[in-house]
Amino acid sequence: MAEAHPVGFQWVMEARKRGAKVFHVDPRFTRTSASADVYLPIRAGTDIALLGGVINYILTNELDFREYVLAYTNAATIVSEDFVDAEDAEGLFSGFDPATGSYVQDSWQYAGHERDSGSGHTATARETAAGLRHESHGAPIAGQVERDETLQHPRCVYQILKRHFARYTPEMVQRVCGLPPEKFLELARAWTQNSGRERTGCLIYSVGWTQHSVGVQYIRTGAIIQLLLGNVGRPGGGVLALRGHASIQGSTDIPTLFNLLPGYLPMPHHAQHPTFDDWVNAIRHPGQKGFWGNARAYAASLLKAYWGEAATPDNDFCYGYLPRLTGDHGTYQQVLDMIDGKIRGYFLLGQNPAVGSAHGRAQRLGMANLEWLVVRDLFMIESATFWQRGPEVATGEIVPQECRTEVFFLPAASHVEKEGTFTQTQRLLQWREKAVDPPGDARSELWFFYHLGRRLREKLAGSPLPRDRALLDLAWDYPTHGPHDEPDAEAVLREINGYDIATGRPLAGFAEARDDGTTAVGCWIYAGVYADGVNQAARRRPGGEQDWVAAEWGWAWPANRRMLYNRASADPQGRPWSDRKRYVWWDESAGRWTGHDVPDFEVTKAPSYRPPPGASGPAALAGDDPFVMQADGKGWLYAPSGVLDGPLPTHYEPAESPVRNPLYGQQGNPTRKTYRHPVNSVNPSPPQEHSQVFPYVFTVSRLTEHHTAGGMSRTVAPLAELQPEMFVEVSPELATLAGLNHLGWAHLVSARAVIEAKVLVTDRLVPLRVDGRVIHQLWLPYHFGFEGLVTGDSANDLFGITLDPNVLIQESKIGTCDVRPGRRPTGAALGELVDDYRRRAGVTPGAVPPAVTPGVPIGPPGSGGDGEGNG
Amino acid sequence: MGLRDVLLGWPVYRQLTGADPLGRGAAAQSARSAALTPRTEAADRVARSVCPYCAVGCGQRVFVSGNQVTQIEGDPDSPISRGRLCPKGSASKSLVTSPLRQTTVRYRRPYGTEWEDLDLDTALDMIADRILAARAETWEDVDAEGRPLNRTLGISSLGGATLDNEENYLIKKLFTAMGALQIENQARI
């Protein structure tokens, strides 16, 4: 955090000054470690084992915050007797279908609801990254569930959790992670002591945590701990993600993502959502508890914002215009399709996959096989010049005279040359004022896409083709200003907020969205950002003039709420858990919720409210159900659906690991997404043979002085000067073992690539003793490429393509490699070196290891139709 | 210059006699540095902005003279950053004024070996033509069972996390209307 989010880290330092104890877990000692009380070096890829150890410590010693756990989580809920835990089946849960490498989730459900809660086969859900939808809401489940308030029933969630993690002992943590038990216990003790009415603890991760084949389950494990300790929805608690781009949260909320529409509405699937009603019901699940009951209004209002007058209740608001998913259309599938010649044109909008995405060579070969490529950026990045200066030109794999890709480079406007909002990592929208005009041909994306759309519509005017109706009927009239006819960003923000169509009045919040065509709302979760016709994101009341919540600086979704689920900051009766941790509470005399923040609850629903039988939607949530976007109002220790690779996190080894899984026969995540394509390959891991050909673990992260793929930092003189060279950090022990010299050169080899780097021998990395042997880890920055003021080989070239099954993010924080002294070969010799390694490792390009480790028994997948499984 | 001026100009004298006994402030100041003013003072206007790098969302003040950014500093009013910026945020003025920035359209024709110049309006027109051609060649109306698809898999897009919400909104809206769904950004990486 001190390295990649230094200004955010000032708050950690403030907390430490007030007595907070800071633990830093990282394979490498960093500036964060230097400022922490305790540093725990860990084997990369083993975080579930560490956190599972903390869960086991809490449950074995009964240190959970029992009153919170009982009232606010699903600890007491009884699970189906069909459920078989991974502990009892070598690492596979019940319901695994080897044909698709995914689970049928019926047996994971709550008792009595094995068939009626949207369970079923999750193969389609994996292909469409369906898990990402749950960024704003939980998966559906049945309304009435069986509970045991004593937590003694052997099939209640609490007992299942306890059994599942019973083997995650301090000794096992040492065996898997390489952490000494005394260090682990220091962490477990401190974390659990910050729990209860008076105290909270927070968990902060950077999104490298997500870049694993079990990335979603990493975060689930952290969330389970935080729920057990009562650290969710309370001040000083939470699971806080530090995201890495200025508006990466915004680009997920208003997604430029294949599987989502604004506000986490799913892109329709051709088989599951043929009609508007099918689509809407798949989102709102009639009869469900919680706030998704109003999904029809959000969906209809989005389509009104898209297609304006053409969208009517009679034509299902032009639902038929939406393009349909048939499977995996994610960025890695796209790149393989580019290599196979299936994609004609590609837009790059401020992103540099030639350096920033896994398997750089595949990225560059894909771009070299397009008809056309449009690059919009501030600088001439590697993804624009791969055909001229890329590493494949040096090896002869790309010959400019034979490369057909037509490239348009269009200069972009910088953040000070346009106005608009970024959404930062805590859901806060902040409006930026424009300072100056962009230089020369540089334009904003707003300008480019508005005028591109205008031109497309002009060219298609009068077209009789049905496929052109969606473009011709599009609501695409935005006011423009200035010499370049720049569209008015505030007008777009107003459409995002939503408005009443008859009067034009901006909506005050998403509760005003309607399903009858009388409102248009571009992104329902952002409704309120333009309430009263005021740009709420532009509010700048100085922090020093506000309380610590600072509710009048910018605007947070939803409803300017700064902390989600803050009903949990009060006890079941609605009183603050303690005076010290007071945040939102029930004011009995006023009959409403009040406090420092906007209550995340129906404001007049008393703590004593109990829903009448048969209630659905928000009315079905009781007055002490704080998790209002969850289908049962509870925080989920156990996820009966919604997570595709298991209802509970389980330690699997990374797709590439030198270590045999010490916990289960199953080596890796059995549901991980793999691609059998000649360009892709996976280094062998035990129990496969030849894993010793790639004996070392490498991991990558950011430098303070550079940003992602370097397009905004290797091009900037002061930053280039501060970090001028690609390097690799190795421990003194590894340097001796591999014959590496400090400040000399080394090259690293995987089955995909060989890259070179300067050697930094440092005790920031330590060899770890894991399961009776020594594991060496190397660390690299991933910022370098062949353009800019400072250049170097790209660390991401080393990675292959293996993805998390829930959200289709790649495993690019861990791989295996070999390291050798000296510079890498060049020209044809480079490919020969990689080929030699592949031969010795028995790696066949395009082949992937079996999803289920040989010898692991597979139970019957159970019934379950071809439904999606988790809405 | 009289003796008195020479004496007053001697930092040691000022250190011993003035209010700066440690010689770290006024006593050590030269006449030249005393005459300097920060370029922020000469700015015509200040734009309230936000750092473009990571997602912490630090406040920035952008100082402008004419149509030139002359300085970017942390915004002390921000309850998030309290005026602070990291090395990258502090370098944002160098980012936006970098001589390496491309300010004209560049074009590489198929099988070409060098960049060429191209007019922005022509480029926009060529791109629009290529989109329409790619749609025409790869359009899918329905699946094998006659259910609607309404799409093209011939067009892809990547990027959005460095852009504004308003921009992402128009990008998704336009691509969706043209039937292009292979739209991705850094959140998947």
Image (tube, rainbow, N blue to C red):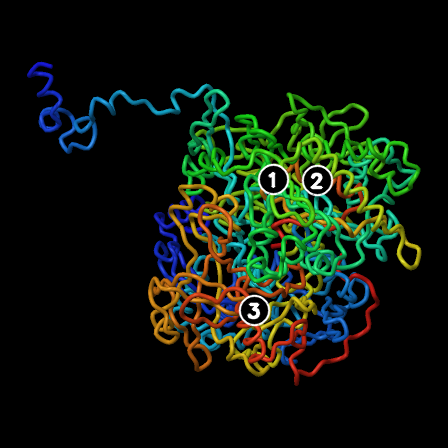
Is A738 rendered above or below residue A444?
A: below
Please name the amino acid that badge 2 sits on: Ile
Q: Which residue appears at 65% of the width and 39% of the height?
A: A603
Q: Which mark is residue B171?
A: 2
Question: Which image quarter holds the C terminus of chain A?
Answer: bottom right
Residue closest to the eye, A556 or B74: B74
Q: Position of residue A615 (x, y in %)?
A: 79, 50
Chain ID of residue with mark 2: B
Q: Secondary structure at mark 1?
A: loop
Q: Which residue is mark 1?
A: B163
Corner quadrant of residue A412: top right
Q: CA distance from mark 1 to mark 3?
A: 38 Å
Q: Position of residue A649 (x, y in %)?
A: 60, 67
Please name the amino acid that badge 1 sits on: Leu
Q: Secondary structure at mark 2?
A: helix
Single out the mark in the foreground, 3 or 2.
3
Please name the amino acid that badge 3 sits on: Gly
Q: Are marks 2 and 1 in contact (CB under 8 Å)?
A: yes
Q: CA distance from mark 3 to mark 2?
A: 39 Å
Is A836 rendered above or below residue A417?
A: below
Chain ID of residue with mark 1: B
Q: Are marks 3 and 2 in contact (CB under 8 Å)?
A: no
**Left or right: A690 in relation to A307:** left
Q: Which residue is mark 3?
A: A831
Q: Are marks 1 and 3 in contact (CB under 8 Å)?
A: no
Residue closest to the eye, A82 or B59: B59
Labels 2 and 1 share a subunit: yes
Q: Which residue appears at 56% of the width and 26% of the height?
A: A437
Q: Residue furthest bottom?
A: A855
Is A840 rendered above or below residue A42?
A: below
